[in-house]
C-alpha cells in the first residue's frame, strides 16, 4: 500500500484533516461510523484508506463519501471505495453531471502546457501526473444529496452551496465542531504559489469570471465556524467570516 500523506490531524472533536501530497481530504467520525469528504488524486486511494485506519477505523466504516466538486484531485478514492466496499458518493445536484463526466469543467492539458513556464507549475505538474492526474475518474455511481439541511451521515454535515469554482461546488459545515470544509472555494495555499492564508484558488485553476468566485463565498459568512479545512493549504483557525474578508481584501 502506497501511503502518500503528511499525517492526520484532529482539527476538532471527531473531525480529522489529512494533507495529501497535493490536496487534502477530511474524515468525520461518529462512534465507529465515518464520513469521508473528498478523495484526493487516483494515486492517493491507498493513502485515503491508510488515513481511515490511522484514526482507528476501517474502510468499511465509511458510510458515504461527499465531494466538494468533481475535479480529478478530489475524486481519486471514490471509485476504489465503491468497487471494494460499495461506498456511495454524493454531490450537489448541479455537480452530479460533472462527476458522471457528462461534461468536463477543469484545467485542460492544453492550458496546463501553456503555463508550464510559470514558477512552480512544472514540478507540481510532474508530481500530480505521477499521482494519477491523467487517469479517468468518471464516477457514474455519484448521486445527488438532499438539499434540505443536515445530511443523515456521520458528523451531520450541512452542504453549503459555493457554486463558482464549478457549477455545483459545495462546502460542508459541521456545526457541532465549528468546522467549515471549504474545498477549492477558499484555500490557504497551493503548491504553485508562495502565499499562505485564506485566498482564492490560483488563477490557473479559475474558470469563467473571477468575480463569481468571490460571490460564491457569501454563504460562508454567516456560519458559526472557527476551523477552516481547505482543499489546498493548511488548516486555518479563526472565524470563517474573517477568512472570507481576508480573501476579499
Image (cartoon, rainbow, N blue to C red):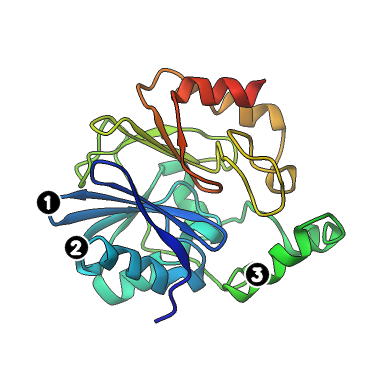
Picture coordinates of residue 214 (x, y %)? 62, 26
Q: Residue at x 55, y 48 (%)?
A: 232
CB within 8 Å, label 3 to label 2: no
Is disc 2 surrounded by few (<14), some (14 to 19) or many (20+) residues within 10 Å? some
Picture coordinates of residue 58 (x, y %)? 21, 68
| Residue 220 appears in the figure | no
- Quadrant of the snapshot with the N terminus: bottom left
Q: Residue at x 71, y 46 (%)?
A: 194
Q: Measure how far apart labels 3 and 2 are at the Cα level.
A: 30 Å
CB within 8 Å, label 1 to label 2: no
What residue is shown with label 1? 31
For residue 11, above or below residue 142: above
What residue is shown with label 2? 61
- Quadrant of the snapshot with the C terminus: top right
Q: Residue at x 46, y 42 (%)?
A: 235
For residue 153, above or below residue 33: above
Q: Earlier in the sequence, mark 3 or mark 1?
A: 1
Is disc 3 surrounded by few (<14), some (14 to 19) or many (20+) residues within 10 Å? some
Q: Nearer the viewer, residue 236 or 25?
A: 236
What numbered label is drawn on residue 127? 3
Q: Nearer the viewer, residue 78 or 9?
A: 9
Judged from the image, the secondary structure of the residue bearing numbered disc 2 is helix
Q: Earlier in the sequence, mark 1 or mark 2?
A: 1
Which dot, 1 or 2, sits closer to the camera?
Answer: 1
Q: Earlier in the sequence, mark 3 or mark 2?
A: 2
Which dot, 3 or 2, sits closer to the camera?
Answer: 3
Q: Residue furthest bottom?
A: 1
Amino acid at each position: 500500500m502506497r501511503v502518500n500523506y503528511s499525517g492526520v490531524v484532529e482539527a476538532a472533536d471527531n473531525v480529522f484533516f489529512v494533507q495529501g501530497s497535493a490536496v487534502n481530504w477530511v474524515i468525520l467520525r461518529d462512534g465507529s461510523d465515518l464520513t469521508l469528504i473528498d478523495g484526493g488524486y487516483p494515486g492517493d486511494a491507498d493513502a485515503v484508506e491508510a488515513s481511515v485506519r490511522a484514526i482507528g477505523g476501517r474502510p468499511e466504516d465509511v458510510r458515504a463519501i461527499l465531494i466538494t466538486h468533481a475535479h480529478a484531485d478530489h475524486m481519486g478514492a471514490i471509485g476504489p471505495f465503491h468497487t471494494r466496499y460499495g461506498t456511495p458518493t454524493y454531490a450537489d445536484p448541479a455537480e452530479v453531471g460533472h462527476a458522471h463526466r457528462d461534461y468536463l469543467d477543469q484545467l485542460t492539458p492544453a492550458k496546463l502546457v501553456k503555463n508550464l513556464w510559470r514558477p512552480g507549475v512544472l514540478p507540481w505538474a510532474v508530481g500530480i501526473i505521477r499521482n494519477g492526474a491523467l487517469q479517468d475518474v468518471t464516477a457514474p455511481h455519484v448521486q445527488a444529496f438532499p438539499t434540505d439541511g443536515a445530511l443523515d451521515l456521520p458528523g451531520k454535515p450541512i452542504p453549503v452551496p459555493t457554486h463558482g469554482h464549478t457549477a455545483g461546488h459545495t462546502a460542508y459545515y459541521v456545526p457541532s465542531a465549528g468546522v467549515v470544509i471549504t474545498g477549492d472555494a477558499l484555500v490557504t495555499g497551493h503548491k504553485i504559489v508562495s502565499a499562505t492564508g485564506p485566498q482564492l484558488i490560483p488563477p490557473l485553476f479559475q474558470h469563467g469570471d473571477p468575480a463569481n468566485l468571490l460571490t460564491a463565498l457569501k454563504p460562508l459568512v454567516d456560519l458559526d465556524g472557527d476551523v477552516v479545512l481547505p482543499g489546498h493549504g493548511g488548516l486555518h483557525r479563526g472565524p470563517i467570516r474573517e477568512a472570507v474578508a481576508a480573501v476579499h481584501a
